[in-house]
Amino acid sequence: MPDDGYSLREVQRMLGVSRSVVEKLIAAGCVSPRGDRQDWRFTFQDIVMLRTAQALRVAGVSPLKIVRALDHLRKSWGHEGSLTGVRIAAVGDRVAVRDEANRQWDAETGQLLLDFDPKRALGNVASIEAPRAERAREEAVELFRQARAVEDDDLDAAEAAYRKALERAPDFTNASLNLGGILVDSERFDDAIAVYRDALHYQPNDPVMLFNIGVALEDSGRFREALRSYELCIEHAPDFADAHFNAARIHEELGEPTKAIRHFNAYRLLQRNQ
């Protein structure tokens, strides 16, 4: 990671989270970027919290419940590094949290839950494990930061560091996204798609990953496959504006104006509502 942190644009590219959700989490104190509103800079820990919020939003939890739950979680578990190992999941329209002692709580109210079924929520679980929780994760985070720092000057070194990070933590989604971005930029589209699809094993139906697969497929000229990936992204995240925009362009290119107009209209509506 650069010394000055991630910009809002980088956060949105990595996570697909809307500016409005970011602003609500900032207002609630869940994330505290440096700088003024025009030039926010986010830490790695901020990224982890925002990814958690986005996973819950995709699972169907309302933004208000997400903000309340994460605020309560931060206040209740965020002292002395006790977020290590804590996991949260969407269970219906609630947010549930499981701590290191395997106790289950309603994250919004703090009430103990007796009927939490981890199998039911498996697909929607988002980890907020601290990077120091285990040695491999710690090494992966450091490699990620090294890669991010040299990405603008030495793509080969950055690629090697991202790959090493994924060897240590194969579920490190941000490393997968950044590595895939390097591969797409160097027109190694099949390699990028393979990296993204590997990441889907750990975050099934992740809309950001599906979107990036679509970009790689589109850039390689496989428009129908790209369209299917964008459609899957939209299926799991109907408010993913850029997926609607890209789907509209492809439908237009393929001579399907009615479908293109539908996606363009969805894109414009989402942009107005942000």
Image (spheres, rainbow, N blue to C red):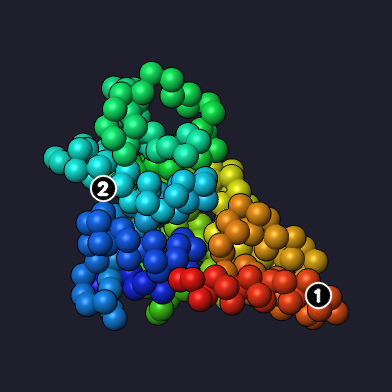
Residue found farthest to the right = 255
Dot 1 crowding, Cα within 10 Å, few <14, some 14–19, many 20+: few
| Residue denoted by label 2 | 71
> Hey, what amino acid is under mark 1?
Thr
> Hey, what amino acid is under mark 2?
Asp
The kind of secondary structure element at disc 1 is helix
Q: Is residue 127 visible?
A: yes
Q: Which mark is residue 232?
A: none
Which mark is first along the chain, 2 or 1? 2
Residue found farthest to the top = 114
Please provide percent x and percent y for residue 2.
30, 71
Please provide percent x and percent y for residue 130.
29, 44
Q: Is residue 199 visible?
A: no
Which residue is nearer to you in this view: 265 or 36? 265
Q: Residue at x 27, y 62 (%)?
A: 26
Please provide percent x and percent y for residue 251.
78, 74
| Count of picture labels | 2
Dot 2 crowding, Cα within 10 Å, few <14, some 14–19, many 20+: some
* 262 left or right of 33 in image: right
Q: Residue at x 51, y 76 (%)?
A: 272
- The image quadrant that residue 190 belongs to is bottom right
Q: Which mark is residue 258?
A: 1
